[in-house]
Image (cartoon, grey):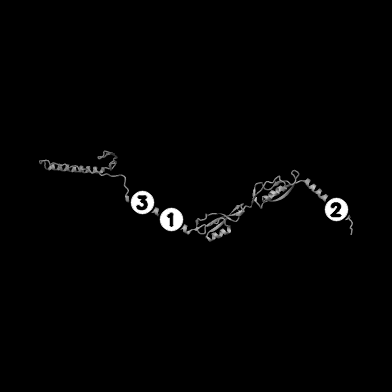
Amino acid sequence: MIICPNCKTENPDDAKFCKNCGYYFLEETENKNDKSKKDKKEKKNKVKHKTKTKNKTKTKVKKEKPQSKKYVQYNDKPRSSIFTKVLLLFFILLSLGLIAIVSILGYNYYMENNIEVPNVIGYSYEEATRVLDTANLSYEMKEEETTNKDEVGIVIEQSKKAGSKTHENAVITLTVGVLDNHVIVPNITSMSLEEATTILNENGVTYRIEYEETDEKENNTVINQSIKANKKIENTEVLTITVARNNNSNNENATDKNETQEENKEDSSTNEEIPNEN
């Protein structure tokens, strides 16, 4: 361990500078080495001089005054140059300026060299396509079902907002309203045939009637429907309704028919018996 002669601070053995005051330890070591060499040389000369001049009086050796020690203070941490800091700051500001200039130029180029999207909502599809053709823009149609008849064939939405910028021949998706052809099947089971057909006509459901011979259900009563109630179907799809037909009713109809025929025969025979007055 090295003790600083200047501030008496303990330092590691391999230290070159005092960690407190920055004293340079090697300077003192060099001075000591030089002094020891000088002392040895003087000692040698003195011995030599003694052998040659034993009778002569001893010459007095002048003692050199120790030179004042110059303490040089060093800093372990390297100081960055002010010029380097200024240069670094300059490059940072220059980079930010270039980025800002490029951004402004790019935005201006985008605004000046791109096409403004027109507003075609509320136009018919044919009118909207003519407007987009004039603006050098492409288009495609997307259908959307609607129950509002006023929206049929009309552009109700466009993929790019009106007033926004886009490139030439950009594709604009036009959403066009088409009439909803779907209907909801009502529940008509156990209704009379007359009631069932009235409800089906009101809901726009296409249907056909089938009869089934049975005595378990009342005559002309709907006993089954081919499509479940509350299901959404196209108005072109056919619903089959099964209606009950009783055997008793058939017999009654046949009896009524025979009675009618007999009455007609009697009327015709009566007409034949009337004499011709002419």
Q: Which amino acid, by three-letter code, is at mark 1?
A: Ile
Q: Which residue is mark 3?
A: 89
Q: Which residue is mark 1?
A: 104
The N terminus lies in quadrant: top left
Residue at 57% of width from left, 59% of height from top?
A: 127
> Element type at marker 3?
helix
Crowding near the residue tagged with mark 1, few <14, some 14–19, many ≥20 C-alpha atoms within 10 Å: few
Closer to the camera in the image, 159 or 91: 159
Closer to the camera in the image, 21 or 49: 21
275 w.r.t. 70: above or below? below
Closer to the camera in the image, 85 or 269: 269
How many marks are shown on the rendered structure?
A: 3
Q: What is the quadrant of residue 223 in the picture?
A: top right
Q: Which residue is mark 2?
A: 267
Label whose residue precedes the other's in the sequence (3 or 2) = 3
145 w.r.t. 6: above or below? below
Q: Which amino acid, by three-letter code, is at mark 3?
A: Leu
Q: Position of residue 73 (x, y in %)?
A: 27, 44
**Mark 1 and mark 3: span between their CA atoms?**
23 Å
**Mark 1 and mark 2: span between their CA atoms?**
107 Å
